[in-house]
Amino acid sequence: MRRSQNSRPLVLVVDDDPRHGQLLNLLEENLAIKVFNVHSCEEALSAVKENSFDLILMDYSMPERDGVDCTKCLKEIFATSEILPIIAVTGHASDEVKRICLDSGMDDFLTKPFTINALQAMIDKHLALNADN
């Protein structure tokens, strides 16, 4: 498993609403992670080329390129290299949106609003799976 320099997992948060990233910044200590916020797919693509992330929290609804399109682009980048888990984080709680996210290559699905315990469990699950690979 990759780790950021401070040994905490480095989590890329891709969300066009800066308040969501700010919330995760406030939860960094509780979640034992380091958060790196971007607000668009283009910023996410640049960030993954310049940093070693352990996990991505991907918003589903974003202007220009949504989370589904961004995930497909990211999966192409990592197609021949290590696994980088991508978790959909969205207010769209329908089974159809969940299926769309998972079919695009996202590895899991978390509905907003979520509890800190649900987010922690999701992060722990995917970091453990990534450590096993």
Image: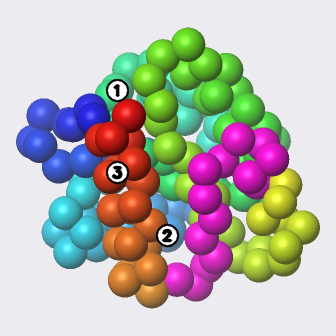
Residue 99 position within the rendered picture, expressed as x and y whole percent measured from the top left: 83, 60
Q: Earlier in the sequence, mark 1 or mark 3?
A: 1
Q: Nearer the viewer, residue 85 or 21?
A: 85
Q: Residue 127's mark?
A: 3
Q: Residue at x 30, y 41 (%)?
A: 131
Magenta segment: 101-114
Residue occupied by mark 1 = 51
Q: Confirm whether residue 20 shows in the render.
A: yes
Q: Is 88 part of what is drawn in magenta?
A: no
* 29 horizontally vs 20: left or right: left
Residue sitting at the far left: 6
Residue occupied by mark 2 = 19
Residues at marks 1 and 2 touching, judged by CB atoms closer than 8 Å:
no
> What amino acid type is highlighted by mark number 3?
Leu
Residue 4 position within the rendered picture, expressed as x and y whole percent measured from the top left: 20, 37
For disc 1, the neighbor class at 10 Å (few under 14, some 14 to 19, many from 20) is few
Residues at marks 2 and 3 touching, judged by CB atoms closer than 8 Å:
no
For disc 3, the neighbor class at 10 Å (few under 14, some 14 to 19, many from 20) is some
How far apart, in angstroms, are the residues tagged by discs 1 and 2?
23 Å
Q: Is 103 part of what is drawn in magenta?
A: yes
